[in-house]
Amino acid sequence: MKKAEATRINILQKAFELIYVKGYKTTSVDDIIATTQVTKGAFYYHFKNKDEMGVAIINELMKPALTSSFIAPLEKEGSALDAIYNLMYHLLMKDEFMKVEYGCPVANLASEMCPWNEDFNNVLNEVTEQWTKLMTATVERGKKSGTIRKDVNAKQVTMFVMSGYWGVRNFGKLANSRSPYMLYLKQLKYYLDTLKA
């Protein structure tokens, strides 16, 4: 890896860590420079401004991480309902990337930046659209295999499950505890069981 490329990746990784903990708006370019120990000139060599760097964080760091955490588990063969439940359980109870006290980085950036920045809105929407499409396809797969009732609306199930996930991440952040996650997972299990054929 060339030095310039390594510097860029270092900036993105350290900036992501700061933003995840402190929030996007309260993390300054000076904070990022101090943490990465690069010069201001080096920062602006790689990024025109903070927002360009923020979009790069989503595209270059978050999308690959989220693909492996959120997308790949749903692509495995097996029961569609088990795949959805196991994914949610893993994300909330086992995933070491996302910290309880800081919530979901995608949800955080969406609530903080999307109303004010179209570029953030577009790239974050791409991430969530990919997850939405795959979860909807997973439910449809269950309907085709006969494990999920034919009358179930796959898009509605997806929106319900994902909304609950994003919401409970905020409850966990407020409580600084996984206890809200357990309540969600228990009700999610009950809900998914009602979809069985």
Image: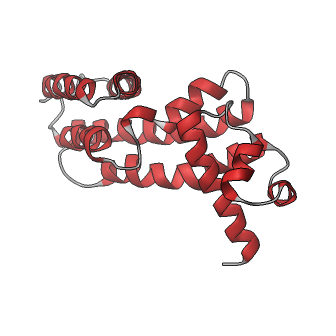
Say if residue 85 shows up in the picture.
yes
| Colour mapping used in the image | secondary structure
Tag count: 0
Horizontal and vertical percent for residue 179?
23, 26
Say if residue 103 shows up in the picture.
no
- Residue 164, compared with residue 51, is above or below; it is above
Quarter of the image that includes the C terminus: top left
Q: Nearer the viewer, residue 6 or 135?
A: 6
Q: Nearer the viewer, residue 33 or 64?
A: 33
Horizontal and vertical percent for residue 53?
73, 48
The quarter of the picture where residue 113 lies is top right
Quarter of the image that includes the N terminus: bottom right
- Residue 167, compared with residue 10, is above or below; it is above
Q: Is residue 146 left or right of residue 108?
A: left
The quarter of the picture where residue 99 lies is top left
Q: Is residue 52 left or right of residue 130?
A: right
The quarter of the picture where residue 89 lies is top left
Horizontal and vertical percent for residue 122?
66, 35
Q: Is residue 45 left or right of residue 150?
A: right
> At 27% across and 46% down in the image, what residue appears?
94
Q: Nearer the viewer, residue 131 or 68?
A: 68
> At 27% across and 31% down in the image, what residue appears?
178
> At 61% across and 53% down in the image, what residue appears?
14
Horizontal and vertical percent for residue 7?
71, 66
- Residue 40, compared with residue 120, is above or below; it is below
Q: Nearer the viewer, residue 140 or 184?
A: 184
